[in-house]
Image (cartoon, rainbow, N blue to C red):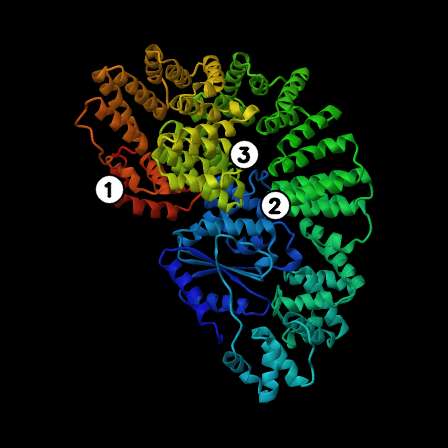
Amino acid sequence: MLYGRSTELAALDELTAGAREGRSGALVLRGEAGIGKTALLDRTAQSASASGMRVLRVTGVEPEADLAFGGLVQLLWPVQDRLDGLPEPQADALRAVLGATRPPTRDRFLTGLAVLTLLADLAEQGPLLCLVDDAQWLDQATSDALLFAARRLAAEQVAMVFATRDEGFAAPGLTELRPSRLDTGDAVSLLADLGLPPALRDQVIAESAGNPLALIEFGAARRDDPGSFTPVTVADRVLSSYRTQIAALPEKTRLALLFAAAEGRGDLPLQMKAARTLGVGLEDLEDAERAGLIQVTESTVVFRHPLIGTAAYQGAVLARRIAVHQALADAADDPDCRARHLPLATTSPDDEVASELVAAAERAADRSAYAAASLLHQQAARLTPDRRAQVRRLTDAATCALNAGHAGQARDLAEQAERSSPGPEDLARLAPVRAAVMFESGERREAARLLLRTHAAGPGPGPAILRTGATYGWFAGDADSVREAAERLASLGEADPMVEGMAHLVDDDYARGLPLLERAVAAGQDGSDAARTRALHSAILLGDDAAAMELAAAEVARCRAQGLIGALPQALHLLAERQVLAGAHRDAEASVAEAVEIARDTGLRERVAWLGGVPARIAAIEGDERRCRDLVRDVPDVGRVAGESALSLLELARGDYEAALGRLETAAGPGPQRHMAMAMATVADQVEAAVRLGQSGRAERPMRAFEAWARAGRQPWALAVAHRCRALVDGREEDYREAVRLHGQGRRPFERARTALLYGEWLRRARRRSEARDTLRSALEDFEGLRAVPWAERARAELRAAGDATTSAKATAENVLDRLTPQELQVVRLAADGNSSREIAAQLFLSRRTVEHHLYKAYPKLGVGSRRELARLNLV
């Protein structure tokens, strides 16, 4: 019976009941050692099994904390026969985890998606409970995969419970429950069977501070030795109690327990194979088993509590531990298992051992277990006698740490490698890691210069380091770095039209720069993935909306097809920006919502903040000031132009022209960022604000730059806006007319509507009221379609002033798609196109049941009852 656990049991029962009813969920039990987490898991497992739920269980073990996917192998081994039913990239990822020979996993989050799909498939046969004990000792690759799955659970009939100590296993986003200490009444009930005298019982209760394990252990110890007491913390007293029990056992039994603690996984055959080399056999476990310290089956040895294993290991002298780890390494058939024990058995440099660790690190990296790979490379470096080889291994460790998302650790390892006096080639290998860390921490100019210095020092670095240096320089506003990278690429015979184009743009030479970007766009249409990425960014710099939309959509599709979950948020971000420009606000919001969810699920916190710039722009257009300001507040410095342009648009719409102009003048600043398409789009706002203030000279310089950029790029929307700006300044009707004509060929309805509004105002002031009304109605129609409330109000006011007495504020006609959440919108569109639930799930990184859950909720909102009816709707 569990005492004092009614609150915790109610929460766990609610979680499992929800799974049985089709509502998935996850819960973290967090608390000190001995507080009763394992007992709660045991009771939950028993209750779930009795109700017909399938239970999968894994326990983290301290010796395996750095073994790539050790925990996931334990969890999934009983269900590996279900892998064939997964989408091929996901199946390959899990086969690699389970030891099958497969191609390297390209994305470290793909394994988490595969776990989600597998759990959902298992739940098709009935509700499923996954229990994870001692989660603080899971290897990071397993933690990442399980947390990714837990955060994306919705309607799969899956419940997950993680039990962890106070320290370790950060699980932001999941509900946490902290088991309380037992009160006096429950403590008395727990001790009742020990028959302690009241005075001794009260002393045990005071010493154990309500910790259930301490109550049991201290009570038993006081019953056998009433004078025992050690004035230390509860956990240390429990550990000391276990050490005392182990110390009383025969020497060979203590050694057998040391083998069990050092091996960690409970693999009895491996333990006995290794133990025989030191004269220990199965019979030597008997005394420990009779004492209740371990449970032994035909194939496993399990400590009754993890602290017993800790006591067995810590209580042994170093020489014994080294001998045991060496015996386990020699007995292991699995090279990764051998690699786990070798560094613990080696106290001096040993190149042969180091080479085995490097091989294990490479295997871990092939499975995207970068944190484990980094540690193995570090261990290899420690055991490497040759200094240059040591530097290479530290560099590899830093690279893997960066790939695992541990920028701080990568920086520390890179600095450690630098202190080992690396040669020029070593520095060249180290530079990309150091530069990436610098760039992510805001030192963008320094990152660009480092890469260029590294290339100049040569030999070794190829063109890729120069392309990266140019990109860093561009975002840093460092024109010299961009130019230098372009010149060096050309001198190598590796001229890159994108980098060359950027180099001309930083010199305001649009006539030479933009045609080069056009070449990069054309070259990337059917090129490699890297070429297509360069083409996408070139199209954005050009303002070529059609090419950018097509390339961004293709990049999103590629990420979905190949399971590149870590890269998908950025691809969706770029797509969402294009969708806003095209006036597809609901599509953009759906893209951003998916990107934010994935970024949160994968720990990409910076990307979550950066994504706020897109809905902020939508909120600004639609006049939602509070939402716009809330979103912009969290946009990081690198997205400053997007955030400031959104706020300035709000100010422009409400007539605060001085604030809008001042904000844009400050945000533009010097450097290449001002040439980005988003920054160029704000020039029109600068011009309008300056003209409204009667200070058009303040916008003359950016307007001339924009005109030159528009002429060189020949994009209809840009030429139209350039003519509109010139018309505002000079008041020539021919510029307005040309702007209206060019907007007919463009893709930016918001800019088209603004041009029509300004031309309509001009016509009204010229007393050409009939023409003004036609033009203003066109503007109003576009603004209403975009839900640009403040702009629509301006258009109506102008129409009234032009004599249109019938125009009044009216509610925008409801679009049925607005009833859907962003994810429901994505799902119904894919379903309407004929995709099955499983195909939609694979594309959106969801489970089939979650897809069907979204369809079930969407049907009544749309007034349909089936996929066939859905296909007849206009879902654009």
Q: Is residue 281 visible?
A: no
User: How many C-alpha atoms fall within 10 Å of the one at disc 3: few (<14), some, or many (≥20)?
Assistant: some
Look at the numbered disc 3 and give the secondary structure of its residue. Answer: helix
Of circles 2 and 3, the one toward us is: 3
According to the image, label 3 marks what residue? Answer: 638
Q: If you read the primary sequence from the N terminus, does the residue marked by circle 1 or circle 2 appear first?
A: 2
Residue 734: where, in percent of width, then height?
34, 10
Look at the numbered disc 1 and give the secondary structure of its residue. Answer: loop
Q: CA distance from mark 2 to mark 3?
A: 30 Å
Residue 599: where, in percent of width, then height?
50, 42
According to the image, label 2 marks what residue? Answer: 369
Look at the numbered disc 2 and give the secondary structure of its residue. Answer: loop
Left-right relation of 269 to 172: right
- Whether 106 is drawn above or below 772: the answer is below
Q: Quadrant of residue 262?
A: bottom right
User: How many C-alpha atoms fall within 10 Å of the one at disc 2: few (<14), some, or many (≥20)?
Assistant: many
Kind of residue sitting beneath label 3: Val
Left-right relation of 165 to 124: right
According to the image, label 1 marks what residue? Answer: 864
Kind of residue sitting beneath label 2: Ala
Residue 29: where, in percent of width, then height?
51, 62
For this orientation, the residue located farthest to the left is: 806
